[in-house]
Image (cartoon, grey):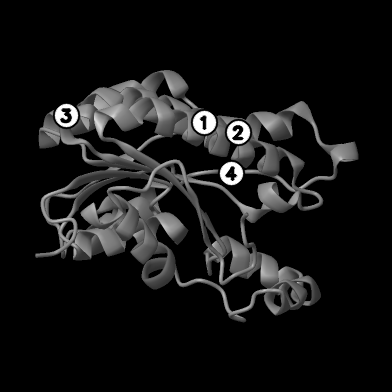
Amino acid sequence: MRKLEGKIAIITGAAGGIGKGIATAYVKEGATVAIIDLNAEAGELTIKELQEYAPESIFIEANLTEHDKLADIVKMIAEKFGKIDILVNNAHASRMNSIADTTQQDFDLSFGTGFYPTFYLMQAALPYLKETKGNIINFASGAGINGDVNQVSYAVAKEAIRAATRVAANEFGPFGINVNIIAPIAKSPGLIEWAEENPEYYQGMLAKIPMRRLGELENDIGRVAVFLASEDSAYITGQTIMVDGGSIKLR
């Protein structure tokens, strides 16, 4: 049997990049997915690909900064499919700036698209995940763990997500809900674009990855997300899983 057979998963930011890689890995393992993204054109194209494996999967166009609407989206998905098994909070947007140049708008963007949707979606999904003893997967970054320069608004929001995930693991564990973090380095469109604009910096980053390559969206990041949503990880919660080719070794 496929690892996620019959599971219903919500995945944010899944019109492309890491979210699409996870959604693809999920449907191939038997899950039906509800992907949420602001990019309607990309979302419609992606859902057609996913429906080849999971015909009932749906795309929801939504602006995750409209926090008051998130609970309604979760309720609609739960009513449509009868349950929710998996929540993947992948979406996050930010601007690079030094501490000296970072503005309130930079923080508003990073927290508004990353931390707050993660928090409110966990909150909204909790009653449904209690029923299924489900799984939550949130996303952190080496930028927060290492304190990368020019990344303060992104790093702080990602570390806030890690803190909320640890609290959720303690609070939700008695209900049989697992809550974990993936911190990836992945061959996303955004990273590729950045690498083309900053080739020397990119080569320096690549040289620091022991495996000397970027993670594949589906086969590397997606497969770990499958593991964390499956019975194979039933006794793992509150953990940050570094899917970064060995770049950061947590202690």
Does label 3 or label 4 sit earlier along the sequence?
Answer: 4
**Given contact means CB atoms under 8 Å apart, are the residues at marks 3 and 1 in contact?**
no
Amino acid bearing label 4? Ala
Residue 228 image point, x, y percent: 34, 53
**Given contact means CB atoms under 8 Å apart, are the residues at marks 2 and 1 in contact?**
yes
Instruction: Give the residue pinned by disc 2.
Output: 160
Residue drawn at (46%, 23%), measured in percent from left and top?
67
Amino acid bearing label 3? Glu
Position of the C terminus, as image quadrant, is: bottom right
Label 4 – label 2 distance at C-alpha: 15 Å
Residue drawn at (51%, 71%), measured in percent from left and top?
215
The kind of secondary structure element at disc 2 is helix
Amino acid bearing label 2? Ala
Bin the neighbour count of mark 4 within 10 Å (Cα to Cα): few under 14, some 14-19, many 20 and up: few
Mark 1 or 4, closer to the camera:
1
Bin the neighbour count of mark 3 within 10 Å (Cα to Cα): few under 14, some 14-19, many 20 and up: some
Mark 4 or 2, closer to the camera:
2
Residue 73 can be seen, yes or no? no
**Given contact means CB atoms under 8 Å apart, are the residues at marks 3 and 4 in contact?**
no
The kind of secondary structure element at disc 3 is helix
Image quadrant in which you'd find residue 49: bottom left
Image quadrant in which you'd find residue 208: bottom right
Label 3 – label 4 distance at C-alpha: 32 Å
The kind of secondary structure element at disc 4 is loop
**Given contact means CB atoms under 8 Å apart, are the residues at marks 1 and 4 in contact?**
no
State the mark number for residue 93: 4
State the mark number for residue 164: 1
